[in-house]
Each structure stands twice: as C-alpha cells, then as structure tokens.
Image: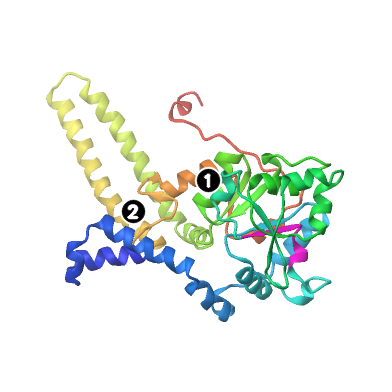
Amino acid sequence: ELYSQLIDLKDNNEFEFLDGKTYEEMYRDARACVDLCHRDGVIKDEVARNPAKYVVKDPNMVPMLKQYKEKGIKVFLVTNSLWTYTQDVMSFLVDPEDTESGDWTDLFDLIIVGSCKPAFLVDPRRDLFRVDKASGQLTNTDGVYEIAALNPNGATKFLEQGNVFQNGNFNQLAAMLDLDGKAITGEQILYVGDHLYSDVLRSKRTLGWRTALIVPELEEEMKTSESQKETNEEIMKLRKLRETISVKANALRLLPSNQENDEQLETLLDSDRKIKEALVDIVGSHHKAYNPIWGQLFKAGYEDSRFAYYTANYACLYMTKASNLRYVSDQRAFRTFSNPLPHNSATE
C-alpha cells in the first residue's frame, strides 16, 4: 500500500523530488525503510506497549491448541520475533487461566524465536541456543548431536532442560519433534504460516512439509462471492455465449464466401461485439465489488492471479485463521482433486 501511494504521488506530480526517482528506486527505498522498521524495533515496541490496539484475540486459538495437544499431537511455534516480543504478544493472547501453570508456553511442545525464516528452512548449519524464559539469556546447545547423545528418548530429555530456543534450523526442529525415537519426516509436519514465500513456499518446496496458508482476506472474499453469485453466473453465461458464437463464426469462415454466409457472419460478429461491450461493464462492477482498485484477490481478469497460482501449488490447505483447525479432528484427511484440462471436456 505504501508503494502504491508513492506511485500515485509520482504519477500526479505532487512532489517534485519524486520526478528524479524511477519506480524501481522508489520500491527499493520503501522496502529498505520497512525492513529497517522491523529491525530497529520501532514497530514491535509500539505493539508491545499497547497490544490490544494492534493484536486481535481469537477465542478459538487456545481451545484448538489444547485439542491437538490432548490427542498427543506435538505442537510447535516458530517465529522470527525475539523472545521479549513473543512473550509480550503471547501473554496478551493467552490468559493465565488458560493453562494450569498460567504459562502460555505450556500450550507448545517447543518454541523457537528469532528463527530468521526463511534461512531457518534452508540453512542446516545454523546453531541452536536455549532461551532462559525469566531473563532471556541464551546458552549454547549442540542441537541434534546433543539429542543423539541423550538417547534413548534424547529429544524428551533435551526439551526437559528447557523448551524455548533461538536461531536453529529445520533439522534441529525435526529432531526435537521425534516420533518413536526417530526425527519426523516432512510429510508428518503441518506447518501453518501467513507469509506465502517465507513460510509456505520454502517449507513445501525445500523440505516437503505439509503446509497451511493463513489468508485473512479470504473471509471477506467469500462473503462477496456469495453476494455476487448471480452476477458471476451472468458473466459465465455471456462468456459461454461468446464461445458459441466464435465456433459458429469459425465454421462460416471455412465455407465459400457468398452473400448469405457473409450476412450470417456479420450478424454473429455484431452480436459478439455487443456481448463484449456488456461484459466490460458487468465485469468491471463485479471486480470492484471485491475491491475498488485491485478486484478479486484470487483473480486477475478471467485468469487466476499470481497469488492464486502460488497458493494452489504450494499450500496444501489455506484458511482465514489457524484456529479453523479446531473444527477438524486429528484423523481428518484432506484429498486433492485434479482440475480438468481443456481437452478433457471433449471426452466427457
């Protein structure tokens, strides 16, 4: 949004100093400023001071975590935020009475802060440090080697010494989430994240993890789709009609040219032009119903958007919020269905 506003300012010649900037330079400057805000703490410090203003509590989050823990499923938290900020936000989201000890960390088998994703998901050489929850002090660990040295039940013994860590990598996470004495494999992990590239794409493509993408905008998108159902059906009807006209026009073009064929062809083309003009207005208002500027999140015109492409290819599941998993049992299986290709319609 910041970058799009800068583009408007440049295009409208509202600030002279932007005349000497290219769009690429503007993007790089905006990106550098946003990255700096995340590094120097100016954003997180403000959130920590007043979490109720910026963080939305989800009443289903704690019940969902408890539900899976009670079923014996191991639950972990991996975040790029450091311990102090993670403690502030999670203490706001989880009330003391939500756990027997009053400590939100009991909802997780292990917690990794300052993970530096996506490096956490691709670099196997990153060291793992244990975090003292009271002081925030870090101590060295030998990670997977220490777990192996503590066998049998090395992971359990390792986590009993403290289950909050910083830095680390995917191999150490898998070793700590051991199953019957063995580090779990990628297909046994369901990784839930809200960043398409840093979370979902990297974990799926590099590690083969099962992935779930959080798309908060999806809830409003689905409500709008329901209200626009009749309009969408009208659009599909008109598009199919244009396709029918195109097929008939093509057949006429292959026939010998004469007055009758030429008149029929012109009539078809005139009908097609009128339908096309009608579609421009209908489609325009349809897309603006979702967003006056961007239209649908998952569509770019009639095609799937780039966001939709990556979501479909790298997210095993996608949902509005993680707590939606509360409504499925630990035994629920999700199966994919192949999308038909154009040639399939000729044989169905």
Checking the image for residue 201, the label placed there is 1
Which residue appears farthest toward the left when viewing the image? 259
User: What amino acid type is highlighted by mark number 1?
Assistant: Leu
Q: Residue furthest front?
A: 140
Q: Does 73 appear above or below 243?
A: below
Q: Is residue 218 visible?
A: yes
Asked whether, in this view, residue 340 is left or right of residue 92, the answer is left
Q: Which residues are magenta?
A: 105-113
Q: Residues within 10 Å of mark 1 (few under 14, many from 20)?
A: many
Element carrying mark 1: helix
Q: Give the numbered dot on residue 311.
A: none
Asked if residue 106 is positioned above or below residue 150 in the image, the reply reads below
Nearest to the observer: residue 106 or residue 123 = 123
Which residue is at the far right? 152
Amino acid on which the number 2 mark rests in the picture: Val
Tell me how far mark 1 sits from mark 2, CA to CA.
31 Å
Element type where label 2 sits in the image: helix
Residue 324 at what x, y percent from top left?
A: 66, 59
Which of the marked residues, 1 or 2, is nearer the chain's N terminus? 1
Q: Position of residue 30 (x, y in %)?
A: 34, 63
Can residue 50 be seen in the rendering of this structure? no
Where residue 160 appears, as percent x and y from the top left, is: 82, 58
Along the line of sight, which residue is nearer the eye, 126 or 39? 126
Write down the residue under mark 2. 283
